[in-house]
Image (tube, rainbow, N blue to C red):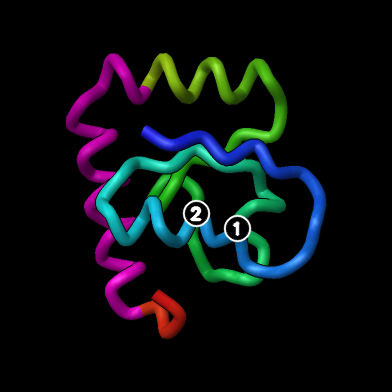
Amino acid sequence: MIMVPVRFGSGTKIKVLESLANGRPVIAAKHAVRGTDLVSGVHYVEADSVQEFVEAACEMSEDHERAKGIARQGWEWARVFPAV
């Protein structure tokens, strides 16, 4: 599981793209996926506060099937993303 709490800056966040391309479930701030068409709950899990990151990490750690599904959908998305 990869956590990307980026809340400012510009451009596509390479850490997110690399993580998806490597089949890792991603928990990311909304800003970290800006400029993509990633969908929270499908390709990654959105978290914008410390509490949301903690809750998402606990949920992903406990629900392995959901984590695998998020990782798989993220990987499928990354396969067709032009920059990866």
Residue drawn 38% across the image and 19% down it: 59
Residue drawn 51% across the image and 53% down it: 15
Give the residue at mark 1.
33
* Depth check, front residue: 17 or 37: 17
Q: Amino acid at mark 2?
A: Val
Residue 5 falls in image quadrant: top right
Give the residue at mark 2.
16
Give x and y (percent) for residue 38: 49, 62
* Left or right: 64 in relation to 4: left
Give x and y (percent) for residue 8: 81, 50
Label 1, secondary structure: give it.
helix
Residue 84 falls in image quadrant: bottom left
Q: Tell which residue pokes out farthest to the right in this image.
A: 8
Label 2, secondary structure: give it.
helix
Circles 2 and 1: CB atoms closer than 8 Å: yes
* Left or right: 46 in relation to 68: right
Q: Earlier in the sequence, mark 2 or mark 1?
A: 2
Give x and y (percent) for residue 33: 60, 58
C-alpha separation, residue under disc 2 versus residue under disc 1: 7 Å
